[in-house]
Image: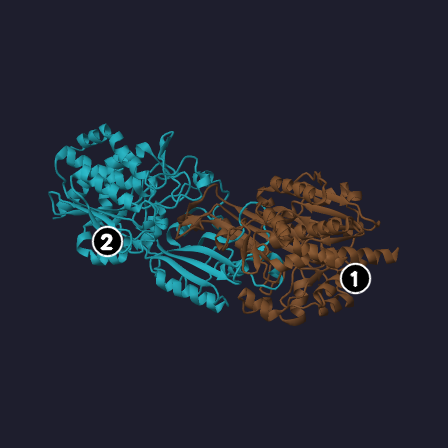
Chain colours: A cyan, B brown
Amino acid sequence: MENQIFEYIDKHRDYYLKWLTDFCRIPSVAAQNRGMQESVKYLEQLFDEAFNVYPEILATGGQPVVFSHLQGKEGTILSFYNHYDVQPEDPIELWKTPPFEPTVVGNKLVARGIADNKGNLIARMAAVHAIKKVTGELPIDIKFIFEGEEEIGSINLGTFAENYQEKIQADACIWEFGYKDGEGRIEVSLGVKGLLYVELFAKEANTDLHSANATIVNSPAWRLVKALNSLKDDQDRVLIPGFYDDITPLTDEDLEMLQRYSIEEKKLKEHLGIKQFVNDLTGEELKKKHIYEPTCNICGIHSGYTGEGSKTVLPSEAVAKIDFRLVPGQQPNKMLQLLRSHLDENGFTDIEIRTFGEEIAARTHPSEKIVGAVLETVEKYTKQSPNVVPNTPGTGPMYEICQKFGIPSVSFGVGNFTSYTHAPNENIEIEDFIDGIKMVASLIFTYGKVMAQQN
Amino acid sequence: MENQIFEYIDKHRDYYLKWLTDFCRIPSVAAQNRGMQESVKYLEQLFDEAFNVYPEILATGGQPVVFSHLQGKEGTILSFYNHYDVQPEDPIELWKTPPFEPTVVGNKLVARGIADNKGNLIARMAAVHAIKKVTGELPIDIKFIFEGEEEIGSINLGTFAENYQEKIQADACIWEFGYKDGEGRIEVSLGVKGLLYVELFAKEANTDLHSANATIVNSPAWRLVKALNSLKDDQDRVLIPGFYDDITPLTDEDLEMLQRYSIEEKKLKEHLGIKQFVNDLTGEELKKKHIYEPTCNICGIHSGYTGEGSKTVLPSEAVAKIDFRLVPGQQPNKMLQLLRSHLDENGFTDIEIRTFGEEIAARTHPSEKIVGAVLETVEKYTKQSPNVVPNTPGTGPMYEICQKFGIPSVSFGVGNFTSYTHAPNENIEIEDFIDGIKMVASLIFTYGKVMAQQN
């Protein structure tokens, strides 16, 4: 049966690639509210074409969730969480091909959002489509939950999940992302970090001024530099009092999992063109920091004149966008309070904090059946052990729609080591997309079997 | 005679205003090499129309200098230094009227460059034009020296002045700028500060990355924040070793001059919407810092995503534009070396310095004849004492084409307290422009008389 499905997928590769490229042509940038309705419309048509049903368009207060529940033979329910929004394409000048014109470059397909995560969204729909076409039915129930605000912090998904708790209930959830590592092994991720995304804003005079006035008029740019400087020391350690206090201590099991996970340091450094990692870390310490430690990162900073040449101006405003990646135990709203207190106590009461997103970290225990099913599927298909990571260093609303309701969640997908997610020239390998469709199809049967044995 | 000239100016006010508004329509932004040739062409036509001569267009290696020498009855030579370039109009969204469409708003005329310094350039040409029309001749020789790179640090003017030393020789020079203070008194400035304009540039990975990588990949934005932070303390004191060492000590005469100079503190704070000045300074200390102390100002800073909403990115580059205003004794090239050494000694060898401009500070002694002539002219016309400042807190290439060759230089002009130079909504008062033409005409006669008495 599996072989027939794989054959069907191979025969229809161009058909599924067209689903993907048509989808990637839509500039669905949630941060700028571009192409969102168009994306929803596209998914409606695709569900109709693939499964002969229209999905439910569920209101969230922001961009709607596209939802569909397809019935299977068994009572087991597997859900797929994905998102139809993408990151802004900025800085546009660094793209070698237009970000919203999917382009084949060698063995790759390049487009904004193709790795994160339109490639996975389409691969999963394609897998379910192929199973239905070949077998006429589904072995288990499938739910698709496609949100439209993942890249802006899933700001409405928590409330949505509370409101639609019954609809989203499942035995397990396959999460949105996934990549091959530097050795070509599939990474399987059992969790995500949390997030607090803020803007720090400084203002002084009511207008930009000739910079001769910098003698006597305070500079918001300098205020912001001083405030930022107070947040981290030279060893990348966050200086906000209490920032590390609530972190759930690592267990021996956590450290064992970390040992099995690997980072290809040399390849990664070469790929990124860097000489060393933060604090010159290597080996276990490097992995530990990457997976289990929080961050305080400057996503963007702006003040004054940043065009060509020189302009002698004293800016009236300065702003920095900061994301804190949080680990289990760290509550975003508490971290926000700690940040405010820290700034106040250091005399930065004038620095305004604007909050853009809060997400709670999540991990799935490796003993969960869905974890076993995914590992078995990937190992069987790729003929090598997957690279299992206790949680990725990235973020998603996994807690809000999975762990909070007792749903275990695992992530793997069609991206690769050099996919440039959130960056110019985002890409996937075309064969990884086809392999991804097959692995998802295979997983649906494997998970069905595992769950049937249990019942 | 003077009354007849003033009457002629009054009758031709719309004619001279048209010279000005036509000139301000040209977006002569040297930093972006926009509208420069057009400006030169406009000035050629204007010289032809006003004086029936074409000016000399003198090559500099960059934008040319527009030069003209008009013969007068006496051997005395008075030169006018002005510039035909303007600052970039950015941030465009804060302009209430289009920056390159001069617009009357109440009693003001609003346009980029109108205060700094197209209003003065045209007022001076108009004054000379009116004298010639009414008297048929000039009492003294007049030289116009109009450069096109003042707003980008007059990068070629030093070499130009060396090459054309004879051409630019004069008994005195009237400098390009000038403003009314908060009390409506004309400010007369006897000097300028120097300048060192640099970009600090930090780079790490070869591409922007998903900010999840901030755990292990160094951030150029953080590097830049830390490097900047090392440059200044919380009391606005520059921390670069040796920065203050070469400053020429203030004399009793300097401090006396400072006492006579005034800053309308309350009005200035209200106008700028600020609660206090740097370090809560007031009175003599405030004036002293404004006039006699150097600065280290952030003109601009940029890294990563600074658009709407949130983007979780680890930027690959960060840049800050910094201007140091220097005072007599501080050599820009030495300050640049000190900056490099400071960064190196603090571990910031990776921070690249790009130099955009260097200028040396200049002051004219108050005992010079041109100073007396200007003060007499302004006091007679405005019927109040001018607000004399030993040097303005701003910068210009005064040293390169005046003090270096023994030419005393004084500055006064048609701007005002709320002219917003280098900022959105730059403006002058229309009557100040007309008054400015008259004062320049009057000065030409007064200076001629003072010099004739000497000879």
Return the x and y of residue A11 as percentages of the image width and height: 22, 28
- Local crowd at mark 1 within 10 Å, few (<14), some, or many (≥20)? some
Name the foreground residue: B271 vs B73: B73
Q: Which chain contains the residue that carries disc 1?
A: B
Question: Which of the image's four quarters has the N terminus of chain A?
Answer: top left
Please tell me whether mark 2 sits on a helix, a strand or a loop: loop
Image quadrant in which you'd find residue B382:
bottom right
Q: Residue at x 21, y 37 (%)?
A: A127
B263 relative to B132, above or below = below
Q: Which residue is mark 2?
A: A59
Label 2 to label 1: alpha-carbon separation: 77 Å
The amino acid type of the residue labelled 2 equals Ala
Residue placed at 18% from the left, 39% from the top?
A: A48
Residue A167 in the image: above or below residue A118 = below
Residue A37 as seen in the image, left or right of residue A425: left
Look at 57% across and 60% down and name the residue there.
B107
Q: Which residue occupies the foreground of this view, B161 or B6?
A: B6
Chain letter, disc 2 residue: A
Disc 1 residue type?
Gly
The reply to whether residue B240 is in sight is no
**Mark 2 or 1, closer to the camera:** 1
Relative placement, left or right, of A249 versus B187 is left
Camera sees residue B74:
yes
Residue A26, quarter of picture: top left
Query: In front here: B342 or A449?
Result: B342
The residue that disc 1 covers is B372
Rendering coords of residue A381 (x, y %): 25, 35
